[in-house]
Amino acid sequence: MALLRFPILLLAGLLLHNAAALPHHGPAKHDYRDALTKSILFFEGQRSGKLPPSQRVSWRRDSGLSDGSSIKVDLTGGYYDAGDNVKFGFPLAFSATMLAWSVLEFGGMMKGELQHARDAVRWGSDYLLKATSHPDTVYVQVGDASKDHACWERPEDMDTARTVYKVDPSTPGSDVAAETAAALAAASLVFRKSDPTYSSRLVARAKRVFEFADKHRGTYSTKLSAYVCPYYCSYSGYQDELLWGAAWLHRATKNPTYLNYIKVNGQILGADEQDNTFGWDNKHAGARILISKSFLVQKVGALQEYKGHADSFICSMVPGTPTDQTQYTKGGLLFKLSDSNMQYVTSSSFLLLTYAKYLAFSKKIVSCGGATVTPQRLRAIAKRQVDYLLGSNPMGLSYMVGYGAKYPKKIHHRASSLPSVAAHPGKIGCSQGFTGLYSGAANPNVHVGAVVGGPNQNDQFPDQRNDYEHSEPATYINAPLVGALAYLAHSSGQL
């Protein structure tokens, strides 16, 4: 039942196949447009706060309406990260950043889904504005995770402590603060044309929050360890988020201050580190790809070295190249962790497709120890990963709920697994709800679009609700997938 997020890489010797030639499962003809629609709809099922009239996920109701009242700050809204009822600010902000990046790179391909995607971004950025309403303070969590995880309750019923945790000069958290700044800056770009007043407010707040993150340095889980660990400890430190945050502010403002910050601090902040795991904890790979755009697309010569940094990451991800560090299951799935592995499948696929876009625009390729890697190769790798997720795998199972004929029915998700308020108006208490956790029946509420943690290293998925490592969905799994699906739907002629 506990929600643990340990980003520790599996040892290659345990299982996996680092193969240049991975098995194909036939010419998977997926409806990427349908999957895109559902991947965005998922976020409405994760909403906290007062739900709008446009709410499409009807089995959810208002929740967390007193969040922040204990400290006289309005912290209603935002997203529950996964299958629990805590608002964890670190993964929430990363999810918001990746949703915004998905829209920025591939929104032009989304057509009718673009407004829904913008709505999903705004639901996150509205909350992050509330969480940064006081200077030199970021409210980084609402809810006592230990008490929340001791209950199995619908968010509409939750009566556990809604304790608020914050970072400030005496309790620094450069990681979560810089990620929050990144999310605000990225969202400002999403709304630059459609709502310039809102966009200006977002970027102004992003600047202020980044300044706080940089001035008061420290890892948020150092002093808040008892409350944020082991759920979302900052294992990689804060250097990656400072680089990532500066990159987003440079993109959002074009202010030479941020360009100079990247030039002066990039190496200290790990720009050339060889880590290739991109997710809510470690942003180095994403920062390298993002900054490389400044050189490849905008011709900022001062950042030429980031083409090399980005290439190093890409070469580590391409099977068969001399520097390939990637492990795959026999069925062909990128495999990094036993816990919520699908988050790395979606984030890596997004980066491959985004870098392919930059390379194609600049008519460049990647050279991996003598092996030439083209944008087409990167797109093919990403497509195979998304196809696996959608059902082209040994089990013939879609890992997106509600997509395809066969998908997980017993996901680790409180609201999905318990009767809706409409079906059961009476309160379902803390302990009473555990009958839902251990029930052998399918979840009564189909959480359409939710992507679960995925199969194990043997391509097997038991579909057990109490198996949170494999059966729990999360916002940071879906956020980068939105962009990848938009590209695939467009490139296949479905959009």
Image: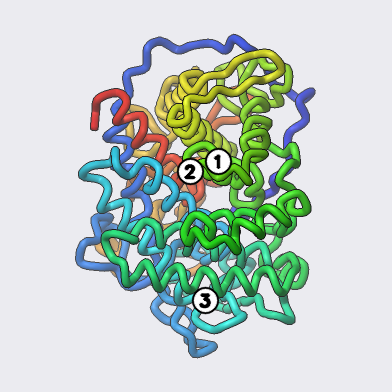
481 and 298: which one is in front?
Answer: 298
Q: CA distance from mark 2 to mark 3?
A: 31 Å
- Name the residue beneath numbered marker 2: 298
Identify the amino acid type marked 1: Phe
Residue 360 position within the rendered picture, expressed as x and y whole percent measured from the top left: 45, 27
Location of mark 3 (residue): 132
Residue 216 falls in which quadrant of the image?
bottom right
Q: Are marks 2 and 1 in contact (CB under 8 Å)?
A: yes
What residue sits 47% from the left and 30% below the top? 362
Task: In this rendered view, identify the residue nearer to me: 471 or 230.
Answer: 230
How far apart are labels 3 and 1 at the CA level?
A: 32 Å
Q: Disc 2 versus disc 1: distance between alpha carbons? A: 6 Å
Q: Nearer the viewer, mark 2 or mark 3?
A: 2
Residue 171: image location, x then y, percent: 72, 77
Q: Residue tagged by mark 1?
A: 295
Kindly state the secondary structure of the residue where label 3 is placed.
loop
Residue depicted at x 76% and y 49%:
267
User: Is disc 3 surrounded by few (<14), some (14 to 19) or many (20+) residues within 10 Å?
Assistant: many
Residue 88: x %, y % from top left: 56, 64
